Amino acid sequence: MHDSILTYARSRYLWIASALSAASLIAYNLYDPGGPPNGGTWLGYTLGTIGALLIVWLMLFGMRKRRYGSHTGTLRGWLSAHIYLGTSLILIVLLHAGFQFGWNIHTFAFVLMLFVIFSGFFGVYVYLRYPNLMTRNRESATRDAMLDEVAEIDQNALALADGIDPKIHAIVLRSIQNTRLGGGVWTQLRAHDGSDIALDSLHAAMAERDKRADMKTTEMPTMFAMVDFLAGRATDKQGEAMRALIDLISRKKGLATKVARDIQYQAMMEIWLYIHVPLSFALLAALIAHIVSSFFYW
Amino acid sequence: MAERFKIAIVGSGPGGLSAAARAAERGESHVLLEAEPHLSNTIFRYQKGKFVMDEPGILPLRAPVPFKAGSREAILDGWDEAAKRLKINVRHKHEVSAIKQASGGGFELKCGNGQTITADFVVMGIGLQGNIRKLGCPGEDLPCVQYQLDDPDEYSGETIVVVGAGDAAIENAVALARQNNVVIVNRKDEFARAKKGNEQAILKAIEDGRIECYYNSAPERVDALSVGRKKGRMILNTANGKAQILIDRVIARLGATAPRAFVEGCGVTFPSKDPAAVPAISAQYESNVKGLYIVGALGGYPLIKQAMNQGYEVIEYILGHKVEPADEPLLKARFAKMPGFRTVDEALARIQKNVRLLAAITPLQLREFMLDSDIRTPKPGETIFSRNDYTNTFFSIVEGEVQVVVDEAANKRIALRRGEFFGEMSLISGRRRSATVLAGANCVLIETPRRSMNRLIASVEAIKRAIDEVFILRVLQSRFAPEASADQLADVVAAARLERFKAGDVLFNEGEVGDCLHLVRVGSLTISRNIGGKDVVLSYVPAGNYVGEMALMGESRRSATARAAIASETVRLDGESFKKLVNRIPVLRLRLQSEYRQRTAANLAMQALPSGGDVISFLLAQGAGEATDILLIDESLCVRCDNCEKACAETHGGTSRLDREAGPTFASVHVPTSCRHCEHPHCMKDCPPDAIHRAPNGEVFIADNCIGCGNCERNCPYGVIHMAYKPPKKPGLIQWLLLGRGSGPGEAPYDSHEHAAGEIKKAVKCDMCKDLSGGPACVRSCPTGAAIRISPEEFPAYAQSRR
């Protein structure tokens, strides 16, 4: 049945990671190196070896993920172990170093490792939180279906605007052309689609018009032009069409907001990997440098 | 005076054409009557360029007309050329409307164009497609009225009226609406006959105004116009009076008239009312009307090559020659294993003598049956199948005996002897084997695949009856009283009835007085109670289990409502006789009581959940009731990484068989578009090369002999099968990484649209990774455990885990 990566197999890997940490702590406290504890002692080498092997193993996750036909456990088990053992790495490496820091390659590798691990923590957070948000936001529709509906509303809005006035048509057309969903990383993460402007509250918009006239947002001109139109020259029938148009556009607004948010959630669930993975490769390089320098420049 | 021939051949399809060609080759007086102005209308109507397969590959072709796998055009050209070369006496536009036995012997064939032809012998090769149903109003044969659409992109900017409400009509209308102004005419007020996807597509198109629809309307007249921009005018009878539409084209897709009425009109009888039944014919293809022969699909042989061989043979038989049937060497090979085998005929006779079940079928049916079946001679003690296997073949015992392990722990066995059969339970219910069967001494068995057996059951009533009777007795024994003898159960068996229910039908209602017990034979049920005005599903009852015993065990009223979750069949056991049985077998009472207690406890647990049953109801509404294994995604865990789809594609040659995003969601439970491995797979229904099978662990998969006809794709109500070219092979990891060749792991192929010439699209579907030792790749590659596969039996437990 369904359970999360943290509780997988009754949190088997939490217990393993805890046992590993506890054993390291006990050994650290019992062992007297006859000097300040550091990586050069017997225990330091042992913990260092464990840590290095763990790092290599943790990085193998990326390979396991792409070995689709593999039958070495499930990917879920691997991820659960990846999280818990990765976390225990902080303690093991601290003990390995005997809490010594400095401006050198060794501490650099340690800091890189912390970046990797904490970006991983962020990943765990978004993995636990965002799926629910995404489901709630979508309300059973798929993103493609929402985009289709947006396109459809655009068509209908254009058709409607065409019957009102060429100027309105031009405005609606421009607004459609200006609607952008997705885009660069930053746009995706900000979930920006101009929805900070509430189309349905026309009066508020009218009141604020003068104040924010200099703001250049994509939707403002559309709305103000329509407000102008409503207030001024529209005949009754046109006014009705106008209202229908505004309804349509506000509906589209709602949808566009949803899509933008959906993209945002997805981006959040992916973006951290662009930090986590490259940094882990950097860590691997730093780790090799750390090991080589430890042995050659004793 | 009517023209007279020795042999009249009706229909110029593969069977008829081959018969005519053989008659021409032999120099016999013959005539080939064809309704259309071209040969072989069914194949002529295939879409342009369609690749036609020549299954079954093992069967040699023995017709004077060439045929091998190739494009529709190549095959038709070959046939036209052969017809000319052999000087076949073909009469086009001669639609035979009646065949009567003439008073002076022979037959009189009345044609639609008024001509009458007499012949000593008639070979009927009219197929099952029958004749296309026309508009049935004046103007139906005008050039602007057509009954087929090859390529919707040929037309643009036209006003086209599509008549019909089936899948063909909808598909045509929707495709044409891209470039044309389309009006669809529907006799009824809904599109219920069509597949769900098509129904949604047409309703959406109508709602969007892309297609105009006339409901409750029928064409009254089509006129050709000589002036104006439009070619014609169509008058419709609508609910609100008459309507006139100026048209460029009318496309009528009204299906085909079944030829059964016509065939029966010729005096030929059908063995059953089943629409799938075909007329019984002798080994020489002769029907019950002497001198009237039937070849091809109408006789139950839908494959082109079979029909062509029959066409050849039937002429030889008519001329009084003895032909060794084309399948003789194949049958010989089949029987070679049989101890004491001498000739095919003798072996067939021995089978019919020993196996009572097969005694009633015609020699031809038996040959066909044996061609599909395997002879097995297992050594004593060998396992024929194991309990919980998912196989669904049917076994008949020709010699020796087998041991059925009734109770594994107590090593209790029942022996089945010569003439008996087994394996019918899984065949009927579509579920796992209920017991292990071991071979006894000198065992000779016939193993028949599901499809051939079902075809036989559908066409021979006696076989169906015999199997049903044995089924009831055995299911009683296995489910209730293994210790009871057939005699003790005789009363219950005699009072038992088979009942059918449509999805959603009620077996009994809460509060009714219970007088019977239902044993589910096909399909599944839900048990629900009305709590606070709302129907709450408490449990799910798959085939092989029973309901309704509670009311017989003490309480006299039904404590819950039983409903068919999908189309189901039950064995209804009469309450009185069942009570008597319970009184006679005390251990049965104890067994029922203990099961009763368990169920009550489970029901109470479900009832205590705030919305436990809702998830089950949702799943059943998605058709999960007929599933054996369904993929569910917990959207509160799914990080939308699509690793499941990637894994599916990577482990199946580059095409994913799963669409994660599509599909409904309820309370975070998402049912993606992915195969559920139905108990009675819809996709298996109509597979010409019989390429869809169920593996021993339950996986329904498509074998390599798929011919790409697309029937399974159309038959699947869940849209989980699609047609795809084989994507190019992916490079190795190193090649990709260092040389940049092709696409990398998890990436879609770059050029999925390119494919080798002559390659055809084949059907692809989930095979539950039956060839991977670890199980389904989608589930195993989900990093967060959002994807799981469960069977409907686990639904209650699943619902409880999601409180």
Image (cartoon, coloured by chain):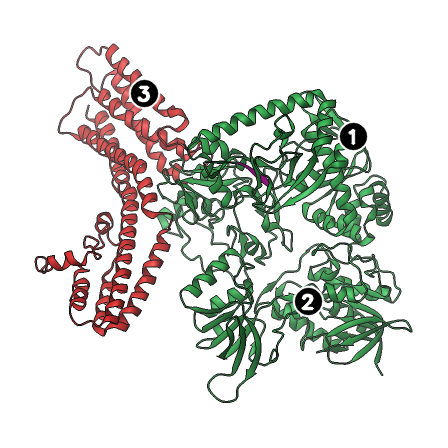
Chain colours: A red, B green
Q: Which quadrant holds the N terminus of chain B?
A: bottom right
Position in image of residue B768 (x %, y %): 52, 41
Taken as a whole, is the magenta stretch helix, strand or loop? strand
| Amino acid at the residue labelled 1 | Ala
User: Is residue A69 among what the camera can see?
Assistant: no
Q: Which residue is under mark 3?
A: A18
For marks 1 and 3, give the CA distance: 63 Å
Q: Which residues are magenta?
A: B524-528
Compared to residue B264, the image places residue B779 above or below, namely above
Q: Marks 1 and 3: same chain?
A: no
Residue A139 visible in the shown view? yes
Q: Image check: B303 left or right of B625? A: right
- Chain where mark 1 sits: B
Could you tell me which secondary element the residue under label 3 belongs to? Answer: helix
Mark 3 to mark 2 CA distance (whole Å):
75 Å
Q: Which mark is residue B130?
A: 2
**Residues at marks 1 and 2 on the same chain:** yes
Q: Which mark is residue B486?
A: 1
Categorize mark 2 by other alpha carbons within 10 Å: few (<14), some (14-19), many (20+): some
Label 1, label 2: how many angstroms apart (C-alpha)?
48 Å
Q: Is residue B412 magenta?
A: no
Instruction: Write down the quadrant of residue B66 in the picture.
Output: bottom right
Q: Amino acid at mark 3?
A: Ser
